[in-house]
Amino acid sequence: MTPNPPSVLHVLAGYRPQPHGGSVLYPLAMAAAQSRRRRVALFVADVDPLAPPYRARDCGIGGVRARCVAKPGLGRYDSALGVPEEDGALEAPFRDWLARIRPDVVHFHAIVGLAASLPRIARSARCGVVFTVHDLQAVCPTGTMVRKGDVPCPGPEPAACRRCLSGVRYVPVARAALYQKILAAAPSRTGRLVLCAVRAARAPLLRVLARRGPSDPAFVAARHRAVSEAMRCAHRVVAPSRFLADGHASLAIDPTRIVVRPLGISIPAAGGESRPTGGATSSIVFGYIGNVRERKGVHLLVRAFATLPNGSARLVVRGAPDEPYVETLRREWPAGASLGGRYEPADVPLLLREIDVLVLPSIGAEGFPLVVQEAFAHGRPVITSSIGGQSEVVRDGIDGLHFRSGDVEDLARTLRRCIDDRDLLARLRAGIRAPVTIEEDAARLGEIYADVSAEVQGADGMLA
């Protein structure tokens, strides 16, 4: 008789009814894929400024049982900077959900935005613990690995971290919880009006509610210690790129527990047929898909595109806007470029079919951008900055092109290569490897879960 596969509880931060971002979309897709073969549940936490702090509700997300907890926060300046262990109010709903679900494995997709104590609680419940690191937020308090002046950061260092944090405003957890209680108690219309005022980026009220980044010299050390202790609870740490694995070296994770392998994506049944391009007279369409904010380097792409010969190319930019940043972009917006707004994850295949080349001009280091894998699934080469995980998953001259991070002129030269050499895109398309599917990924994760469960059971047998 075949034993039941290990059951799993996925834990993530940042869920919204219409989520964006790989660290949320990936675990939701994985949970849905796994639910066909094993028992799966979700524990998710995100900011709901008009809900009572830490209100827990049980629901279904994509057909998977879930417990959703409303964290304190005001939407724009949430406490992602704070030491994760300070948000201990998440412990009670997490313990209760563990007792009800009784998973064999707890799979964490974040620690920042949750509480550093949760992995320890999972281990004390005799669960296997698996982490997937989607980015470097556990290591870098701002999550960018970029210092002031757009200088790439080689790694956490207390003095440098303090300089970066000194100019950041954020709302500490305890303070956000107090404001949230007030908003939740107010009539819904009043609460929403107050929330809109608080969220306004330049509202004077914001400077009262938010505070500047911590200048206490012990902050970075305390944060680092809390995250390190949390992640050392893991039986396995899955890193989708070598860059991410190496980036977490400062946390002193046992290297024998780290597994480096790409994440899977959901690939639509319909193929990604290219629009008719490549002729001598047709213009190339460059595209950017993602959040439109400064660290994503969209301004670099706009400025590089503006140097191209008139009519030689078009540019399509789509994504959730950071409004002050977008207003700056609009002042230098070139002809032949279009700026769209938000899109739903289900829209990505259609957006990719409308472009020839995806451009990822990030100033900060990306860990394993899923949009690159989606582009590859639709036969689209990728131009990306030569840092971070993005330069690892895009092979220069094979399935995409690299340019020097932050260098507008080098990006412009790279765009012109695609225009001047019409055979280049065909060669790059031919070099694309099929990405890992979510189903293949689920099968590989199943092997990790089985190993971890056996390890836990073996430890229990030794204690007995």
Image: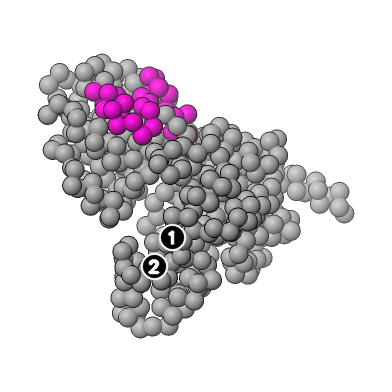
In the rendered image, is residue 46 in sight? Answer: no
Q: Quadrant of the N terminus?
A: top right
Residue drawn at (66%, 52%) of the image = 225
- On whether residue 407 falls in the magenta region, the answer is yes
Question: Does residue 313 sit above or below 452 in this rendering?
Answer: above
Task: Name the residue beneath numbered marker 1.
Answer: 169
Q: Nearer the viewer, residue 346 or 306?
A: 306
What percent of the width, then of the height, locates residue 392?
A: 47, 29
Image quadrant of residue 236? top right
Tally the marks.
Answer: 2
Work out whether residue 449 or residue 374 is closer to the camera in this orientation and state it: 374
> Residue 13: which disc?
none
**What x and y, as percent, mark residue 419?**
21, 22
What residue do we see at 34% from left, 31% from top? 407
Q: Position of residue 140 (x, y in %)?
A: 53, 47
Residue at (55%, 32%) from the top-left corner? 242
Give the vertical position of 171 relative to 394 (above or below). below
Query: What is the three-letter code of the residue carrying label 1?
Result: Arg
The residue type indicated by label 2 comes to Arg
Could you tell me if the residues under marks 2 and 1 are in contact, i.e. CB atoms within 8 Å? yes
Lateral position of residue 243 relative to residue 95, left or right: left
The stretch in magenta equals 389-416
The location of residue 458, given as percent across then percent down, is: 80, 46
